[in-house]
Image (cartoon, rainbow, N blue to C red):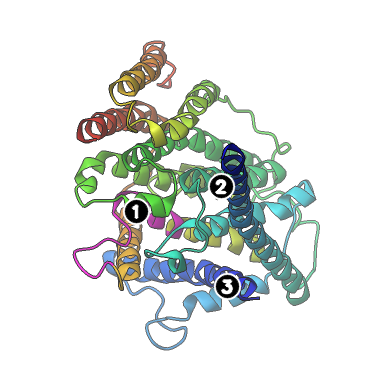
């Protein structure tokens, strides 16, 4: 009975995190972008600085008509948002926020592997949306999404493999138990590659070519309205949470900090994740969109060689010190 | 002696298998929660929203003007070579993960390091070849 309760509680916590954290990131994005661009942003909903704006948005999305274009492949079109969203829920289960059994949804032995594999599934949702919409702009967006995954999954895999080499394990808590502070400078190139590649997989600016509004309307999501569109948006923000959490765990030492690693480890994890999420928003405000060929070039001629170099460095240092 | 050893290893194997299935059954449960969430959201949405389809609404959206042609765009898929490259490289790099967990274990050391450089060399030469052939830049 205790076990059942324990598992239920873990699932509940992961689910609540999945529903709330993306909204917090979204609200922060409203406000940070507003301040960086010298404007107010949402100020009215809820009274205090527009804190309830996303709730109001949610209510609006829920009561909008759900239009499926006449030419669309109905079932695939309707299922696509779920396929885009659910992988991020599953990934959250494996991310540890503190030391000990209690601070992780579920310890998975093949953590890194599981996380990368499941995150890749999310792109299928965009592809399904692109194909099923029967709209040429959606199709172009879907193809660009696929091309982007092809380019950026590889450096992401290689950078993650470098950390697995350093730790000698692919379990996420295992990696953090093996962590020392000097891993941060040692793996810094891998960290940058991982983070940039992750941004590209999420199609966040400056890598938002697949949804470039000035060319292809909104890419694969052009035909979506209401709740289904909201789920795609939620997927994007859940993706930010997952990416920042993973970068924290793999490269920035997760629960390790200058002090208080035992009791307050989870604060460090959350703090680092929040700072990275802020960085994601900052990049969106700062950089213009990359062109499609520049996107591919950045990955194949810069990120992949860099990640290979990181693996070589990791291998040499690891063998020398062991 | 031999028998007890065998017994204990069998029990250990059972324990590992049990832990394996236990941890992934939690993943399965969470997937179920997710599916339930989506189903409830779609179901509730169906109850909340209006349904007033008109032929204009169901038209394909192309910036507000009437759609031209069908859902197929005439485009040159220039990144299919990238797709080949990706498949080759990704299949290679999957093998890095099991190797990464043992390569610095006692008794390996220098040998596996040389192996790693051979592996990286293959990848780098492949990438360089693709670069030389000009498939990494668009014309």
Q: Which residue is mark 1?
A: A176
Q: Nearer the viewer, residue A294 or B18?
A: B18
Chain ID for label 3? A
Instruction: Name the residue at 50% across, 59% down.
Output: A92
Q: Which residue is mark 3?
A: A6
Instruction: Select label 2 or label 3 by which is in front.
Output: 3
Residue A34 visible in this rendered orientation of the protein? no
What is the magenta range? A241-261
| Quarter of the image that includes the N terminus of chain B | top right
Tell me how far mark 2 sits from mark 3, CA to CA: 24 Å
Most extreme residue toward the front is B1
In-front residue for pair A280/B52: A280
Of pointers 2 and 3, the one earlier in the residue sequence: 3
Question: Disc 3 on helix, strand or loop?
Answer: helix
Question: Can residue A251 be found in the magenta stretch?
Answer: yes
Q: Is residue B139 above or below residue A122?
A: above
Residue A94 drawn at (x, y percent) = 50, 56
> Chain under label 2?
A
Element under disc 1:
helix
Measured as percent of width and height from the top left, residue A3 is found at 61, 71
Which residue: 43% across, 81% down?
A51
Q: Is B80 on the left or on the right of A195, as rendered?
A: right
Q: Which residue is mark 2?
A: A118
Residue B25 lies, with reference to residue A170, above or below; the image says below
Mark count: 3
Q: Residues within 10 Å of mark 3 (few under 14, many from 20)?
A: few
The first of marks 3 and 1 along the sequence is 3
The image position of residue A139, as x and y in percent, is: 63, 39
């Amino acid at each position: 009975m205790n076990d059942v309760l324990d598992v239920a509680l873990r699932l509940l916590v992961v689910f609540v995190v999945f529903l709330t954290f993306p909204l917090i990131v979204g609200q922060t994005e409203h406000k940070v972008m507003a301040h960086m661009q010298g404007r107010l942003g949402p100020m009215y909903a809820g009274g205090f600085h527009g804190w309830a704006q996303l709730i109001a948005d949610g209510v609006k999305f829920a009561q909008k008509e759900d239009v499926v274009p006449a030419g669309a492949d109905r079932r695939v079109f309707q299922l696509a948002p779920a396929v885009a969203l659910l992988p991020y829920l599953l990934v959250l289960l494996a991310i540890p926020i503190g030391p000990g059994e209690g601070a992780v949804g579920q310890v998975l032995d093949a953590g890194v592997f599981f996380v990368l594999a499941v995150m890749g599934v999310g792109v299928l949702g965009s592809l399904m949306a692109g194909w099923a919409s029967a709209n040429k702009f959606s199709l172009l967006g879907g193809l660009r999404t696929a091309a982007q995954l092809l380019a950026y999954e590889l450096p992401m895999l290689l950078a993650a493999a470098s950390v697995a080499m350093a730790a000698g394990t692919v379990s996420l808590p295992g990696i953090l138990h093996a962590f020392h502070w000097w891993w941060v400078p040692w793996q810094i190139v891998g960290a940058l590659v991982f983070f940039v590649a992750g941004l590209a997989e999420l199609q966040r600016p400056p890598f938002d070519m697949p949804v470039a509004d000035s060319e292809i309307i909104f890419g694969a999501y052009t035909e979506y309205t209401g709740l289904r569109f909201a789920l795609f948006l939620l997927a994007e923000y859940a993706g930010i949470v997952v990416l920042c959490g993973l970068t924290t765990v793999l490269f920035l030492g997760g629960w390790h900090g200058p002090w208080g690693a035992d009791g307050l480890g989870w604060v460090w994890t959350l703090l680092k994740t929040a700072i990275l999420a802020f960085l994601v928003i900052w990049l969106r405000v700062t950089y213009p969109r990359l062109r499609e060929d520049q996107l591919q070039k950045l990955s194949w001629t810069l990120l992949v060689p860099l990640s290979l170099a990181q693996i070589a460095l990791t291998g040499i240092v690891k063998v020398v010190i062991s | 002696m031999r028998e007890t050893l065998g017994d204990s290893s069998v029990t250990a194997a059972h324990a590992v298998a049990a832990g394996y299935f236990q941890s992934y059954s939690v993943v399965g449960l969470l997937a179920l929660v997710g599916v339930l969430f989506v189903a409830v959201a779609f179901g509730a949405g169906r109850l909340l929203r209006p349904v007033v389809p008109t032929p204009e609404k169901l038209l394909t959206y192309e910036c507000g003007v009437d759609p031209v042609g069908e859902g197929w765009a005439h485009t040159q898929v220039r990144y299919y070579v990238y797709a080949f490259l990706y498949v080759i490289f990704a299949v290679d790099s999957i093998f890095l993960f099991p190797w990464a967990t043992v390569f610095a274990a006692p008794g390996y050391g220098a040998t596996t390091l040389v192996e790693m450089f051979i592996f990286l060399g293959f990848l780098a030469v492949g990438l360089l070849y693709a670069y030389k052939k000009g498939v990494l830049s668009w014309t």
